[in-house]
Amino acid sequence: MKIRRCHELGCICFLWCYDIVKYVVFKSLLESRGIDPLVFLFLDMITVPGFIVGSARLINSLSGQVMAWPKVLFWGGIVLLNALLPYLYAALAGGPQFDSIAWMVFWTLILLMLANLIRTIRAGLIAEKQ
């Protein structure tokens, strides 16, 4: 399976629509937590292309197009940053409104993404040795 540019564009458009729906549905909740919904939407939308392109590079590297591990690490970092930036803003802007369960979910997401990145790098290193 290879993710092509046309697939990336479709995913970007889909996630932008999803972001808008998320904005409409959760606007009042974000405001009640002290988070500016427009800033969250802006951060959520500008991080979509980096997230999709980085994810596509990582998936393609797992499915045959092997990349050197520094490139895998770079794209993994891009994916991680783009996935977490809007939620990091929400955590910081929400301040005391951001309760312990939300922090647990936030750090769980970070750990899962880091574990996936490490697994991707290990798979690339094993593929290079063979």
Image (cartoon, rainbow, N blue to C red):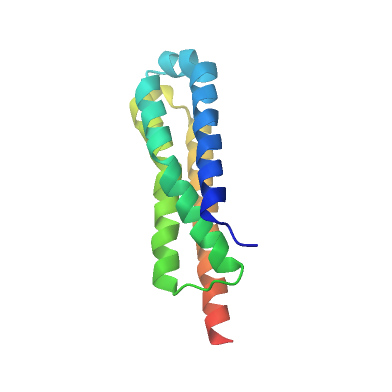
Residue at the (49%, 60%) spot, across then down: 57
User: Farthest bottom residue?
Assistant: 130
Q: Quadrant of residue 82?
A: top left
Where residue 44 sits: x, y (%)? 42, 34
Q: Is residue 95 visible?
A: no
Where residue 70 sits: x, y (%)? 39, 71
User: Farthest front residue?
Assistant: 6
Q: Quadrant of residue 75?
A: bottom left
Compared to 27, does 82 lie above or below? below
Task: Give the number of marks.
Answer: 0
Residue at the (47%, 72%) spot, across then down: 67
Instruction: Work out whether residue 8 or residue 83 is closer to the camera in this orientation and state it.
Output: 8
User: Farthest right residue?
Assistant: 1
Left or right: residue 42 compared with residue 127? left
Residue at the (51%, 19%) spot, across then down: 26
Where residue 110 sits: x, y (%)? 48, 48
Where residue 60 sits: x, y (%)? 56, 64
* Quadrant holding the C terminus: bottom right
Instruction: Work out whether residue 5 or residue 16 is closer to the camera in this orientation and state it.
Output: 5
* Quadrant holding the N terminus: bottom right
Q: Is residue 124 visible?
A: yes
Residue at the (50%, 41%) spot, across then down: 12
Compared to 122, does 6 lie above or below? above
Compared to 106, does 118 lie above or below? below
